[in-house]
Image (spheres, grey):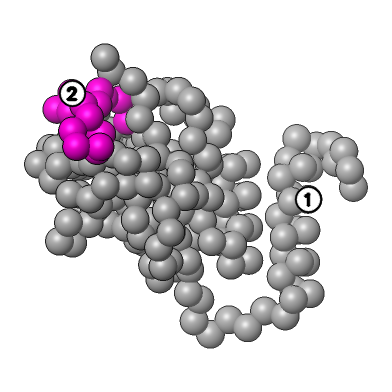
């Protein structure tokens, strides 16, 4: 039976260094590993490479259509809730057994929170969300051929090995005070977006 497959359990691995750049819109862009084929992840699940290859080919059409959005944190749903969207995937490609992506952080409410976390060196990760069934084999839950990739979300504890986001910023030297000031400014903008500032 098909179910929502979300990958949110912590997996002890060294963080992968990512680069940060800016999209033509001025929004931040991050790049890193989104998924890894042929390994048992933190949820004890195993995705075959041919399964990922099929889903990446299909998902690249969603990328081309400018619909490859995701949320901040995994909801318990197969529906991408537009009011919680934080980012959009701009490119996907293979690097060995890794699916690598370029992600634009959007200036939405959730995107502004994500941007504040990234700008203040909070380690975040990405994790896939899909629909599919599982079959246990030798203690491993193999994801079956009916799997359908829905999106990638930003999370605090991704289950895919190596999917932590750690942004390296070249030439920027923020003092601790400036870091907090920037967070306060972003939080104020979010809270005051509808014309009222409830805690300021």
What is the magenta segment's predominant secondary structure? strand
* Quarter of image, res 8: top left
Residue 152, given in percent of the width and then of the height, sits at: 38, 41
Return the residue nearer the eye: 2 or 89: 2
Q: Secondary structure at mark 2?
A: loop
The crowd level at tag 2 (other Cα within 10 Å; few <14, some 14-19, many 20+) is: few
The quarter of the picture where the N terminus appears is top left
Is residue 2 something one can see in this rendering? yes
Whichever of callouts 1 and 2 sits on the residue coming sooner in the sequence is: 2
* Quarter of image, res 3: top left
Q: Are marks 1 and 2 in contact (CB under 8 Å)?
A: no
Instruction: Give the CA separation, mark 1 to mark 2.
Output: 44 Å
Residue 75, given in percent of the width and then of the height, sits at: 50, 30
Residue 162, given in percent of the width and then of the height, sits at: 35, 60
* 4 versus 94 height, above or below: above
- Which label belongs to residue 188? 1
Which residue is painted at 35% across and 50% down in the image? 160
Residue receiving disc 2: 146
Instruction: Assess whether residue 10 is covered by the magenta stretch.
Output: no
Which residue is painted at 39% across and 34% down in the image? 6
């Amino acid at each position: 039976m098909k179910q929502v497959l979300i990958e949110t359990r912590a997996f002890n691995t060294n963080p992968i260094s990512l680069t940060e750049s800016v999209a033509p819109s001025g929004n931040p862009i991050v790049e890193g590993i989104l998924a890894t084929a042929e390994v048992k992840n933190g949820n004890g699940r195993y995705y075959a490479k041919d399964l990922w290859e099929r889903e990446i080919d299909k998902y690249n059409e969603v990328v081309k259509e400018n619909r490859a959005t995701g949320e901040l944190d995994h909801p318990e749903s197969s529906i991408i809730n537009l009011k919680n969207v934080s980012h959009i995937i701009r490119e996907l490609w293979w690097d060995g057994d890794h699916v690598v992506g370029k992600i634009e952080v959007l200036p939405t409410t959730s995107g502004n929170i994500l941007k504040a976390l990234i700008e203040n060196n909070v380690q975040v990760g990405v994790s896939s969300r899909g629909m599919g069934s599982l079959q246990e084999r030798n203690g491993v839950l193999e994801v079956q051929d009916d799997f359908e990739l829905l999106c990638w979300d930003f999370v605090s504890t991704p289950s895919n090995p190596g999917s932590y986001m750690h942004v390296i910023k070249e030439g920027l030297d923020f003092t601790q005070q400036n870091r907090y000031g920037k967070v306060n400014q972003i939080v104020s903008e979010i809270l005051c977006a509808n014309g009222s500032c409830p805690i300021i």
